[in-house]
Image: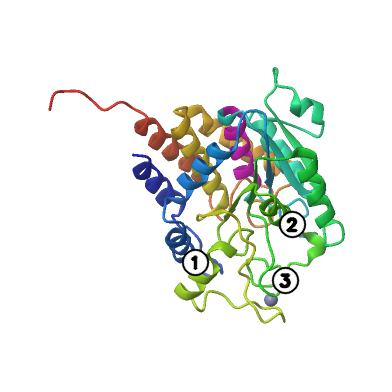
Amino acid sequence: MPEIFGEHVDRLVTIEMKRPGIPSRGVILPLYEAARRVQKRPLTLLAAEKLKENVTLGQYVLIATGSGKAPWRPAGETDGPLGAVSLARAIKLGLGGRPCYVAGKPYMPPVAAASDAAGITATYLREMADYDGFYPTALMRNFPLGHERALDKALELLDELKPAAVISIESLGPNAQGVIHSMTGYEREAEHVALTYHLVEQARKRGIFTLGIGDYGNEVGFGLVAEELKKAMPGWAACKCPCGGSPLCEVTTDVVAAGAVSNWVGYGISACLAYLCQDINLLQDEETERRMGVDCVYAGAEGEGGMKQPWVDGTRPQVQEAIITMLRMLVENAVQQALERGW
Ligand SMILES: [Zn+2]
């Protein structure tokens, strides 16, 4: 039963470990439950099923991630890139799709470094990404920061790559007033943000499958569950800027998946793809996860306390590996044949 498997993957990736005082503490369960009531199926499983349904051999899948703000996080943070890389790896190795990372130029190096560490060579060269020989590759496309060229770039990328799916992981998007907020409730000025929500909106107009992943609700995709969330948590979060709204993103995706850490949701979806394809290797192992984290911060991502250490959202590197260990155990046991002992 895929539902039993998916249910427990969802439970694992929604365990909250945040410290008191962090604004998103206490949010994940109501957010998850609202998303679950709207979508009526384990979220990681639903996302994996839709990816498997929509992505066929040789088709591109755009994966937008990376948010930061100079001078504090000039190359972004660890949450987002690692989940994006896990998904790219599973899509490449499991579905034969061609992942393409989309990020603002300052936020791309940690994504590329983590991808290389995961065995998926990141390249800007289309001919290398199109080549189905020796190298498993992922294409990279930089996205301009700010409003000015965002829509044009979104249309250009969709025209160039004709993707089968667009994934947005831990990418900030605008609220009902058109203002983008960080988790703290303050405005994140557009000049720091790759407004990749245009990719999602334009992809939906073309009938392309879209998937949003986040851990708070200010990320692209949560428009799908906004009404349900407002009912469940009327005081969810007031913003601290003059817009008079909340940080809740109103941009909708076809499927939106929530977890305690966005990376873990990505890992959960990779685990579900591993289950659906009956191949444990689609989910990175602990050693690969460790190298992904280290290389991601060496390339500039901020991990914890403003330092380049492979923590993610206030959780130790060992916890990232532990999540992988448990997800792999879930997959390994779920794909076993039942014991036949005659009783
Ligand atoms: Zn505001």
Left or right? Give the position of 334 relative to 13: left
**Up/down of 298 relative to 217, above or below:** above
- Pinpoint residue 138: horizontal percent, then vertical percent: 71, 33
On the image, numbered disc 2 is attached to which residue? 198
Question: Callout 1: helix, strand or loop?
Answer: loop
Would you say the magenta stretch is mainly helix, strand or loop?
helix
Please state which of residues 315 and 98 is positioned toward the viewer in this rendering. 98
Q: Amino acid at mark 1?
A: Val
Left or right? Give the position of 284 relative to 12: right
Left or right? Give the position of 135 relative to 33: right
Quadrant position of the C terminus in the picture: top left
> Can residue 225 be seen at all in this image of the molecule?
yes
Q: Tell me how far mark 2 sits from mark 3, CA to CA.
A: 13 Å
Residue at far top of view: 134
- Does label 2 or label 3 sit earlier along the sequence? 3
Region rendered in magenta = 81-93
On the image, numbered disc 1 is attached to which residue? 27
On the image, numbered disc 3 is attached to which residue? 178
